[in-house]
Image (cartoon, coloured by chain):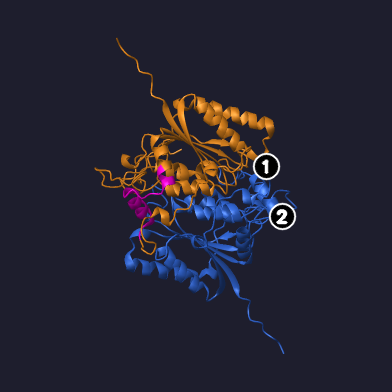
Chain colours: A orange, B blue
Amino acid sequence: MTIIHPPQPRTALWVHAHPRRGSLNDRLFRAGTEALSQEYEVATSDLYAQGFDPVLGERDFGEPAGRPGNIAALAGQALAAGRAAPDVREEQAKLAAAELLVLQFPLWWYGPPAILKGWFDRVLTEGFAYGDLDPELGVPRRYGDGGLVGRRALVVVTAGEDDRSIGSRGISGDIDSLLFPLTHGVLWYVGIDVLDLHVVHDADGLGAEGADRETGRLLDRLKGIDAQTPQRFRRLSDGDYQGTRALREDLLPGRTDLGIHLADGA
Amino acid sequence: MTIIHPPQPRTALWVHAHPRRGSLNDRLFRAGTEALSQEYEVATSDLYAQGFDPVLGERDFGEPAGRPGNIAALAGQALAAGRAAPDVREEQAKLAAAELLVLQFPLWWYGPPAILKGWFDRVLTEGFAYGDLDPELGVPRRYGDGGLVGRRALVVVTAGEDDRSIGSRGISGDIDSLLFPLTHGVLWYVGIDVLDLHVVHDADGLGAEGADRETGRLLDRLKGIDAQTPQRFRRLSDGDYQGTRALREDLLPGRTDLGIHLADGA
């Protein structure tokens, strides 16, 4: 008799960074985590509710305060010595267990709120999220490889502006470029595949009907998430950067925009 | 008899966001503020030393926690009602008094540390840094105009990577694009003219001689600061965006990179 094992529950971590209950973000968070729970075992990091402290500082270094040293290396050494802060270890455990990561936040000053920025600063420690050497290239595994390889991430961002202001020629810069430091510099750096952004425009003026519509649109997005193809940033290990640091001259010659780091140069 | 008044002392605010005494950043901060003091009356915001809390939250809103509302508007209303948090008012007073702003920080995850990101989130309140309507255009004064117009800013950033990795075709994205959300999205948004970035590369491996060299290079930069021409982002009020939100189709047609927002399209 063949025993067909049920599939293991899939795992997700939903990180939420908005201060107010009753906000549009709060609603998207509740509806989104509930819907995702039908397919995934969903852990959450509700950073404001947790009172997460985003300031990378002395408690993360494990060395006497007077001693100079590279901040990232000090935090990595503290982690290796079992002296990382408890809240950091807890977030790392949730992240390590998740195959899908959702980051949800309002766009403040064209980036994530400080509480989420500091979640990256503190949780993505050297030795946990990155730092291993590629045995062939002899360089650190990063950009498509790294401590969190094999995971996928969805970024859900609400913006007060419309799709003209943060569109491809919008005065505020296009949202993909504005969030490149997050999608490429954080997520892809540590090996996480990044799905297309989920952007909610005009978030401050949606009204009840608009909020219903956007909630539905997020749930539709989540429903199809397993079938979605990630953005394809170039991998460091593929040779496009000559295994080192700058894009080969024969690839998209002359271009210097951030789009050159997409594998199709879009 | 003609009385020749001495020039008023010029005023600067130097915001510093590094946790460690004895670090390269600490050294640049001390040497830089001392040198600048020969020409300017220099106030400082040493965010780690002050224990600045970067988390925009309930104490900034002045409304019962359950009440929904636009976060930026709530903070603006609290400010207008004289109920802004004391630390925010103090930072705003220093900023309002400064004609030159220096922002100095290490590049963490391709952006400012959370403690500095949250200084923007909390201090640059609606009604202080932006929010007035342009009487002619009927749109908010921003991008080259706004609450802090007439000031200049120098961004001093230390990076662990070299000028190949964060250069124009570097795998990490070029530093001007990575910091566009700061230079354009924060500073230019509120009316502040932005000088060319001052980037210290390979900051973790400089050694004593390299640290001397970089300290000297920063002092040279400061010495000539009054003669330096700011980057020229396009102004919202100039009509390049048709007074609204997206770049006119006849300007740099087809391009969608962040460089289109420089007045010379570089």
Distance between the alpha carbons at the discs numbered 2 and 1: 16 Å
> Counting other residues with Cα less than 10 Å from the Cα at mark 1, is it few (<14), some (14-19), or many (20 or more)?
some
The subunit letter for the residue under badge 2 reads B
Q: Please check the rendered image and state whether residue A78 is part of the magenta-colored stretch, yes or no.
A: yes
Looking at numbered disc 1 in the image, what kind of residue is underneath it? Gly
Q: Which residue is mark 1?
A: B69
Looking at numbered disc 2 in the image, what kind of residue is underneath it? Ala
Please give the label number shown on residue B80: 2
Q: Please check the rendered image and state whether residue A214 is part of the magenta-colored stretch, yes or no.
A: no
Residue B34, horizontal then vertical, whole percent = 49, 73
The subunit letter for the residue under badge 1 reads B
Earlier-in-chain disc, 2 versus 1: 1
Residue nearest the viewer, comparing B236 with B108: B108
Label 1 secondary element:
loop
Report the predominant secondary structure element of the magenta stretch: helix
Label 2 secondary element:
helix
Residue A65, horizontal then vertical, whole percent = 39, 62
The quadrant of the rendering that contains the N terminus of chain A is top left
> Counting other residues with Cα less than 10 Å from the Cα at mark 2, is it few (<14), some (14-19), or many (20 or more)?
few
Please give the label number shown on residue B240: none
Q: Residue furthest bottom?
A: B1
